[in-house]
Amino acid sequence: MDIDKLKILNQDEVNELYKMLAHLVKTLDKYCIPYLVDCGSLLGTIRHGGLIPWDDDIDICIEEKDVPQVLWLKSIIEGEYQLRYASGKKYLKLKKDNLWIDIFIHKQGVYPQKHRQWRNFVIEEAFPSVKSKFGDIEVSVPKNYKKLLDDWFPKWESIAVVHHSHKSGKSRKSKCLKLELTEELKKPYLPILKPN
């Protein structure tokens, strides 16, 4: 399988998405707001070491009690981005043009969105978090990330599943692709710095 055919984002978009994540993580860490990379971004962090080539956003989660502090920091977090509530205030989105980071809100490991409840987790099994690399960005992951990945993505260590594209606005679930995970498919989609 040609990995380039699976890619949704172009290189400039990938560069910008990593820049957004670095800015957000730096701000959350500076102000001691605990967060975890979540969903496909957790899978990307652990299995790929960065953005999964066929992903098109980044997901993190924060505790509900930390939302007021994040909103208080809105002007610092935003910069050239826009921070806003999404889906009836069930989560936040840090956005620039057609790129975004979803900031899911949980209460003690339980998500309010029905479609996300299969990703609920036991808070004591996730915290204290540990650090891992998303490209060259140090991010927080649940201390039990392997158990969560085993629960959320069965066979994640041997099978790559390609099924969703936010960018196109279409779910690919009906055309779900299951591929044997090769070394080529494990490579992260990394930013490339442009010379000044």
Image (cartoon, rainbow, N blue to C red):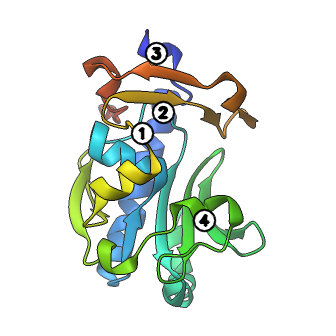
| Residue 32 vertical position relative to residue 90 in the rendered view, above or below | below
Q: What element carries label 1?
A: helix
Residue at (39, 40) in percent of width and height: 51
List the residue tagged with mark 1.
15
Mark 3 or mark 2: which comes first in sequence? Answer: 3
Q: Looking at the image, do the residues carrying marks 2 and 1 touch, with CB atoms under 8 Å apart? A: yes
Give coordinates of residue 126: x percent, y percent.
32, 72
List the residue tagged with mark 2.
12
Report if residue 82 is visible in the image: no
- Image quadrant in which you'd find residue 190: top left
Say which amino acid is labelled 4: Gln
List the residue tagged with mark 3.
4
Residue at (60, 65) in percent of width and height: 117
| Marks 4/1: CA–CA distance | 31 Å
Q: Looking at the image, do the residues carrying marks 3 and 2 touch, with CB atoms under 8 Å apart? A: no
Report if residue 103 is visible in the image: yes
Q: Residues within 10 Å of mark 4 (few under 14, many from 20)?
A: few
Say which amino acid is labelled 2: Asp
